[in-house]
Image (cartoon, grey):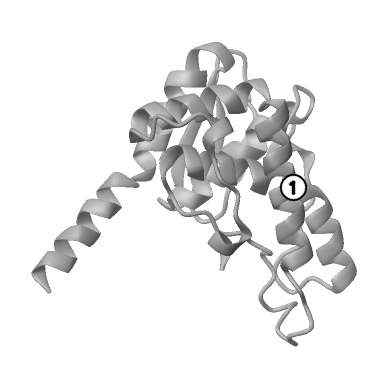
Amino acid sequence: MMVMATATAASADHFAASRLERVFAHCFSSTLNTLLEGGREEPLYLPASAPGEPHRLYYREDFFASALHEVAHWCIAGPERRRQVDFGYWYTPDGRSSAQQRAFEAVEYKPQALEWLFCQASGFRFRVSVDNLKGLANGTYDAAPFQRRVQAQARRWQREGLPRRAALFSQGLALEFGTQRASRDFAFDLAELA
């Protein structure tokens, strides 16, 4: 029992979200005046409220996956989106209808594909999130099409190259977490998502 508890603690330390904050700061704090910070009840992006103030990208509590996901959204958002609270995105909470879920998936597959790339770069396990447990409770929802769309986008970026900020962050993750893997070496197997 003691060995397992020690291994779990070591794993938790290895995937401490504070490490992601350091990588993000190294990559973007001076060039784009943006900070990644945890401790929020819900994720949120706040553009600077005054000249000289930093933009703030908040992730949920101290969750490693939440931080990676929010960075993925930030890496995709263009300059106009980065001037808006939460990048100007709408959000319908858990309990979405089928039509709302399709609209969510239509915009969410790219950030999740990028998150999968970041997970590979850091050695962290990726899980696709449909983010709608109550709305899908009747058992008729099939996540496989969304998973395939996330996989296809991840492979497309692997072939064609990542957006500039995403490439920089991915390289920083590979260095920080010692994976030393380039995105061309990542495997995107749907069996990993089960």
In terms of depth relative to the viewer, which is nearer, 89 or 50?
Answer: 89
Residue shown at 75% from the left, 26% from the top: 78
* Relative to 145, residue 66 above or below: above
- Position in image of residue 90 (x %, y %): 79, 50
Give the position of the C terminus as an image quadrant. bottom right
Judge the density around disc 1: few (<14), some (14-19), many (≥20) Cα neighbours within 10 Å. Answer: some
Count of all numbered marks drawn on residues in the image: 1
* Relative to 118, residue 53 above or below: above
Residue shown at 73% from the left, 85% from the top: 139
- Position in image of residue 54 (x %, y %): 54, 22
Residue shown at 40% from the left, 50% from the top: 62
Residue annotated with mark 1:
152
Outermost residue on the right side: it is: 99
Outermost residue on the bottom side: it is: 138
* Relative to 80, residue 89 above or below: below
- The amino acid sitting under disc 1 is Ala
User: Going by the image, does 114 lie left or right of 78?
Assistant: left
In terms of depth relative to the viewer, which is nearer, 128 or 49?
Answer: 128
Snapshot quadrant of residue 193: bottom right
Residue shown at 48% from the left, 25% from the top: 171
- Position in image of residue 69 (x %, y %): 58, 46
The local secondary structure at tag 1 comes to: helix
- Position in image of residue 125 (x %, y %): 46, 54
Give the position of the N terminus as an image quadrant. bottom left
User: Going by the image, does 166 lie left or right of 144?
Assistant: left
